[in-house]
Image (cartoon, rainbow, N blue to C red):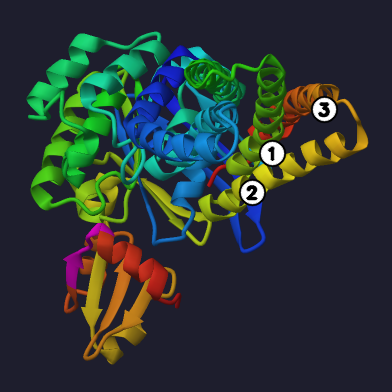
Amino acid sequence: MQSNALVVNDLTKRYPDFVLDKVSFSVPCGTIVGLIGENGAGKSTTINAVLGMISRDSGSIELFGEADTQSNDSIRNQIGVVFDGNNYPDVLSAQKLNRVLREIYRTWDERKFFDLLKKMSLPADKKIKEFSKGMQMKLSIAAALSHNSRLLILDEATSGLDPVVRDDILDMFLEFVQDESHSILVSSHITSDLEKVADYIVFIHKGKVVFCKSKDELRYKYGIIRCGAAQFDAIDNEEAIAYRKQDYEWEVLVADRDQARRKYPKAVIDPASIDEIMLLYVKGESK
Amino acid sequence: MKGLLLKDYYLIRSVLYVILAVFAVVGIGMSFLTSTWVLTVLATVMLGMISVTTINMDKNSGWRKVSLVLPVPRKAILDSKYILYASLSGAGLLLGIILSVVVSICKGSLDLYSMALFASISIAMALLSGSMTIPLTFLFSEDKSMLGLIAAYPLSAAVFAGAALLMDNRIAACGLVAAAGAALYILSWVLSRKHIVKRDIR
């Protein structure tokens, strides 16, 4: 069995005002990989390159072990894609969308599609323009799941949705990866969502991958030392990944909070959320 | 391809009533003011134009991005628009001819020369403008492509008028422009297949 659904290696894309610089990461089968980063960091460019919507200047992309996937319909049948916002013409109903997509996907599973609509309480005969944003997103996900996809790629699919709908969608993701041959690559700047479901986090900043780590490592090992100026001066430069000065304290990001606790017993060391890690990388400085 | 055309059929069906209402009002008015056969040009151009608007509808609805990740070659997406345009223009031509013949018979003025003249004008207008508007709409934003759409029809009319002035035989002039239109349409299709499908979509 294939170990990785997606492998991105040294992906580079140059625009006059932006460079996606040697981005490398992989999406192992049976996992959810979250792509995080601020707006304009390169998440969508990465996804667009993976999907073949933009050409790449250099680097390689492998989907299910195959390199040239743009013209490979069999690979494309196995990828479900959901973009931010509406994905389908709003004059269509779910019923009509089913008729269109069953002509396009060789593996389209009509029964699964209507079962998902029922499960998500989506009316089949109502036009998409009458759907709420959450309903539209659920419909897009239902369509992406109805052609026996093995890899779901979602670009900011949960942004702008209320917490209840987001939670429903995250449950769907978790259900999808119950099958170990299924995987998800999801880009989002709502890191709390990824904290709930992702197995790995790829952090992109200014077109470069800052880190690609397992979520558990980030949650259970990373920490933030909150201290005064004297304590801050005592912290080893090698240990501090990034720091920033707040009103009354210094925040220092460390990769091993247990080790830091042993070394600086008087310091307050909290677990770091993905949001905080991202903020310190983006807004902080290096010692 | 079938799925793409089916989607376009649903899009067109959603705006067809408005187009038919406009066609009825403008067509009746113009056929009384000018020639009955102007209905042929109007029906051909209006129906062809709807297929161009589906390209913008695809962009606005997010379908354009989605269509690029479907298990369908990029060329098929482009082909479907050229096929749709030619089919709808053909349907418009047929509809226009039938309506014009019926109205002419009612008025007692059925004239085969006018029929041939206006049919070739319709074909020329549709193909010349289609060869410009389809790639322009794929390449540019809705606003810019709309300008192209507006410019394409007078430009096509100017080509036709130029040919009519240069040649004494109007039917021959129209036939020649129609043939040139067909050649340009095919050229536009071939060039678009070669260049537009390779463009990045952001």
Badge 1: residue crowd in 10 Å (few <14, some 14–19, many ≥20): many
Q: Nearer the viewer, mark 1 or mark 3?
A: 3
The span from disc 3 to disc 2 (Cα, nearest Å) is 28 Å
- Which chain contains the residue that carries disc 1? B
Residue underneath mark 2: B148
Left/right of residue B60 with respect to residue A7 in the rendered view: left
Toward the viewer: B15 or A47?
A: B15
Residue underneath mark 3: B170
Identify the mark nearer the N-term, 1 or 3. 1
Residue B167 occupies quadrant: top right
Q: Nearer the viewer, mark 3 or mark 2?
A: 3
Are marks 3 and 2 in one subunit? yes
Name the kind of residue labelled 1 in the image. Met
Residue B118 coordinates in the image, percent (x, y):
67, 25
Tag 1 and tag 2, C-beta contact below 8 Å: yes
Q: Residue at x 53, y 56 (%)?
A: A207
Which stretch did the figure color magenta? A269-274
Q: Secondary structure at mark 2?
A: helix
- Which chain contains the residue that carries disc 2? B
Q: Residue at x 52, y 42 (%)?
A: A24
Name the kind of residue labelled 2 in the image. Gly
The span from disc 1 to disc 2 (Cα, nearest Å) is 8 Å
In the image, residue A18 sits, relative to residue B170, either above or below, namely below
Residue B165 occupies quadrant: top right
Residue underneath mark 1: B132
- Which chain contains the residue that carries disc 3? B
